[in-house]
Amino acid sequence: MNDERMLLSDQIRNALTDEIASGQLLPGSALDETLLAARFNASRTPVREALRELAASGLVEARPRRGVIVARTTPERIMDMFEAMAEIEATCVRLATYRMTPLERGELIDLHNASADMVAAGDVDAYDAFNRKFHEKIYLATHNSFLAEQALATRLRMAAFRRTQLRESNRIAHSRAEHQAVISAIAQGDGEQAARNMRAHMLNAASALARYIATVMRRPSDSAPPPAPAP
């Protein structure tokens, strides 16, 4: 697969992710490969790749003779997922605070510092990619392979919702400030405070998602955002 195709596949996946997570694409909606290819001015191959990734995260379902449809996920289920993820992340950062090496700590701080330009530019896509790396470094720094595997698996299932909450007004700036609070607690060697800060960070993300969905659902249909442009 070449880089151009990967980029287009990511664009299609991200656009559909936002529409599904925000409720613009309702549960049960059909996702036809041919229509999506026409919408994004793409071949069916990157569309198929995007749908495969959405299926892996549980956002869509491929059904025999019915094609791909948007999966049914209730708001209550989403909030339950954020609550569970908050506890997993809190456990990870508590262990990581005490177990990470100086090199791992330095890499985490450097990664966090580099996110300032993304926030200044309002680049949600870049911040989303950074955000995944930031949290995954914390999982690995637990030096508990089973816990890291569980955190990664749960994160994959929630990736769409964790991405979409970043579109809520000023959310990426608030997210970065919350990361700073986590980093500060880690630097002080206070695992319990780092866990409390991480738990708050995740629950704030859940609240941001709820606000974003409410805003999108109030928006008149004729003012809905246009489809993502093809490269």
Image (cartoon, helix red, strand yellow):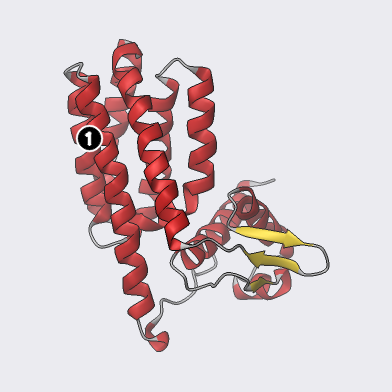
Q: At 73% across and 64% down in the image, what residue appears?
A: 44
Q: Nearer the viewer, residue 219 or 44?
A: 219
Task: Indicate the quadrant containing the N terminus: top left, top right, bottom left or bottom right.
Answer: top right
Q: Residue furthest right?
A: 65
Q: Is residue 176 above or below residue 123?
A: above
Question: What is the x, y in percent for residue 120?
Answer: 22, 51
Figure quadrant of residue 183: top left
Label 1 crowd (10 A; few <14 / some 14-19 / many >=20): many
Give the left or right position of residue 76, taking residue 119 as reference. Answer: right
Residue identified by numbered label 1? 197
Q: At 47% across and 55% down in the image, what residue appears?
A: 77
Q: At 53% across and 46% down in the image, what residue appears?
A: 157
Question: What is the x, y in percent for residue 170?
Answer: 22, 58
Q: Residue furthest bottom?
A: 222
Residue 130 showing in the rendered view: no
What element does badge 1 sit on? helix
Q: Is residue 231 above or below residue 34?
A: above
Q: Nearer the viewer, residue 87 or 116?
A: 87
Question: What is the x, y in percent for residue 133?
Answer: 42, 35
Give the left or right position of residue 222, taking residue 174 as reference. Answer: right
Give the left or right position of residue 152, taking residue 108 as reference. Answer: right
Q: Is residue 20 above or below residue 101?
A: below
Question: What residue type is disc 1 on?
Answer: Asn
Figure quadrant of residue 26: bottom right
Residue 38 showing in the rendered view: yes
- Disc tally is 1
